[in-house]
Amino acid sequence: MDFVDRMPYFLSTLAFFVLLGVVVVVHELGHLVIARMNGVFCEAFSFGFGNVLFKRKDKRGTEWRISLLPLGGYVKMLGDADVSSVRETIPEGYTEEDMERLSAHRKKPWQRLLIAAGGPLANFVFAVLVFFALSEINGLPEYNNTISVVSEQSLAYKSGLRTGDVITKANGVNVSNFVDIAGQIKKSAGGSLDLELLRDNNRITLNIDMWVKNGEKTKPIDNLGIAPNGYKYTKVSTWEALKSSAMMTYNIAYKNMQAIFKIVAGKMSTKNVGGIISIFKVTSSSAEAGIATFVTLIAVISAVLGAINLLPIPVLDGGSIAISAIEWIIGRPLNKKVVNAIFTAGLVIVAGLMLLGLWNDLENIRFLNWMENLFK
């Protein structure tokens, strides 16, 4: 295999690094901006990890670095023992007075809360701005009423729907786009959904029960398992574009949070947890589809990262927000040993989720079967 043959893999890897780099750097810049606004001295901001390739200090004394591994970045504030910002140390040459004035760890609880929230907030703002820019350039995507069926295990497939079907009526209401269809599906949860559709110029009617028996109880279903099969761009006003961009960011964040809580509650399979390989595959596909699709994915991942970081898990920003909020309410700092134990537990949880995502990825690409056959 020569270099030309390897180019697609090279470009996929480059796109993956760009995606991770952008969303993580935006996140860390959010922390830096809010920290500076609250009088915290930021010692360094690095694009990437590992050995420093280039560095330069700005007027505020922050050292801006470009590092070897382009997997995001970090901001190091005064007193941080490491880039995780969990424990405080007093650097050589600094006094207790300096730390009280400039260290994030010595700030008031509400200030530490704002600094922790700065990262997710930056991710949300970035996502809104990207969606808004794309909407101003291309218009808003209007999804048609032709559908794709997600899988043969979906309720849609089991009920007789097929990819390419054109839904013309839902519950007696004329529908011309996927938003209208989705609205009728949501309204039918717990009841029945009447559909009229065209397939190969033949008119078909379906009645679908939007519920499932769970023992003696009835569980409502609000998702058929279909997706739009096409779209066109429609020009809208600046206000409509901004409003739609904010709503899109909110929906992405909300649905991901909802999915996580369903997995924790046992209402959704842990097989839905993806890892780094899943992100790589989606990034590769989006980059191949074009710059607009790739930029859209960056905005989506940014919104997802912002939402995940708000989870009240120690090590994540949500954990720091929760601890700062508790200290703000009770009016005193929590015991340091307790805080360190909480963050250690959080690290275990996050590491466990990452390993679960990686395991699911390896199963999906049949890596274990490949390894087994390799040694036969």
Image: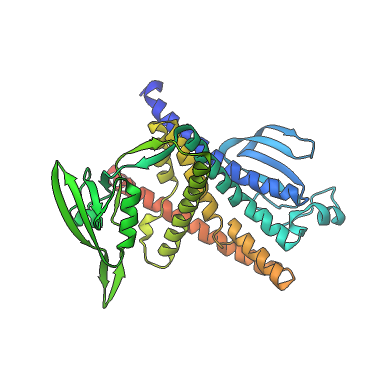
Q: Is residue 338 above or below residue 93?
A: below
Residue drawn at the location 52% of the way across and 55% of the way down: 308
Nearer-the-camera pick, 48 or 221: 221
From the top left corner, tell me how far across and down residue 297 is, in percent: 45, 41
Residue drawn at the location 65% of the way across and 43% of the way down: 29
Nearer-the-camera pick, 132 or 330: 132
Residue drawn at the location 55% of the way across and 55% of the way down: 309
Specify whether 282 is left or right of 126: left
User: Seen from this angle, which residue lies furthest bottom?
Assistant: 216
Image label count:
0
Residue drawn at the location 41% of the way across and 62% of the way down: 263
From the top left corner, tell me how far across and down residue 236 is, in percent: 46, 38
Nearer-the-camera pick, 196 or 78: 196
Q: Is residue 301 visible?
A: no
Q: Is residue 34 above or below residue 337?
A: above
From the top left corner, tell me how far across and down residue 5 is, in percent: 36, 24
Q: Is residue 120 visible?
A: yes
Nearer-the-camera pick, 25 or 366: 25
Quadrant of the image for the C terminus? top left
